[in-house]
Image (cartoon, coloured by chain):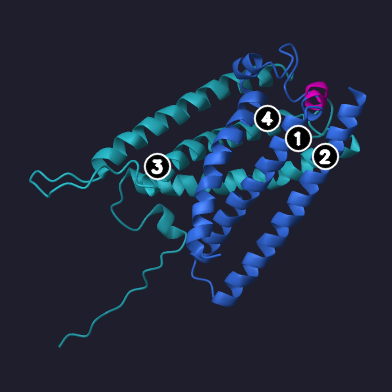
Chain colours: A cyan, B blue
Amino acid sequence: MAETKYHDNRLGIWGWFAGGRWGPERYAYTLHRITGLAVLCYFLMHIVVTSLRAKGIYLWEDGEFLHQPIFLVGEFLVFAAFAYHAFNGLRLVLIEFGWAVGKAEDPVYPYKSSLNKQRPLLALMMLAAAMVIALGAQEFIHALGGMH
Amino acid sequence: MNESSKWTIHMLAGLLIFLLLGMHMGIMHLSGFKADLGVADGAESAVSKDNSLARDANPLFTATYIVLLAVALYHGLYGLKNILCELGLKEGLQKTIGVLLLLLGLGLFGLGTWAAITVHLTAAGNA
């Protein structure tokens, strides 16, 4: 009898990016994690920086350390990450609570899967995120122009 | 509290953040949105010291900041803990990470709450 081979099923962080023939939902998941970590990093620093105003220190004011184009560009990236994470997160919550997976049906050919409901929702949420990001980009470009 | 309850709170916190942080981002970065709400002088940046102090003087904003701080810290740090624990760490290390993130969260919540209340009292006194 042939010996059974076992493979380590844990791909770790590599598994976020590759490891199989994955659909767009898998890459939405990867981007959800990356944007979540990015927003968290910013948020932890944001708490400290904004708390300094209790001591009368406003580091983002004109002439202060954070009032530089590079930080404004970074802020826009955080804004875009938030928009993506928020709309994709809303999709995930709708699916998790069973509100966006469709009703159970008899398995009649041609078979339908819950993906028929989920994928249009993914497209809709990505469209919403893209619209918010575009609106934000307009504002950030305007603010960047006003810095010089 | 079991993991299922923690995960449900994580999702509910996410929904609350969607609303509160969505408003925060709108006020800070979308001029049409902040003008509609009347929360920032249109001629000046929403993040200017004057506009910042005007919002801090409003108890509704202070309360919102504290609620957002609590739910966002929970959502973010619990999410980070899940990502780290999924890497197949040993149970003892997972518990240590959980305790460290809890302490970090409590510390930052204390700092942010203190700052929000201090600035509110100062701004409201000067208004």
Q: Amino acid at mark 3?
A: Leu
**Which of pointers 2 and 1 lies earlier in the amino acid sequence?**
1
Q: Read off the residue under disc 1.
A: B62
Residue A94: mark: 3
Query: Dots 2 and 1: beta carbons under 8 Å?
Result: yes
Main SS, magenta residues: helix
For the residues marked 2 and 1, what is the alpha-carbon distance in whole angstroms?
A: 7 Å
Residue A72: mark: 4
Tell me the quarter of the picture where residue B53 sits.
top right
Residue span colored magenta: B49-54
The crowd level at tag 2 (other Cα within 10 Å; few <14, some 14-19, many 20+) is some
Image position, residue B46 (x, y; %): 72, 22
Q: Residue at x 76, y 55 (%)?
A: B107
For the residues marked 4 and 2, what is the alpha-carbon distance in whole angstroms?
A: 27 Å
Q: Amino acid at mark 1?
A: Thr
Mark 4 belongs to chain = A
Element marked by disc 1: helix
Element marked by disc 4: helix
Mark 1 belongs to chain = B
The crowd level at tag 1 (other Cα within 10 Å; few <14, some 14-19, many 20+) is many
Number of labels in the image equals 4
Image position, residue A98 (x, y; %): 34, 46
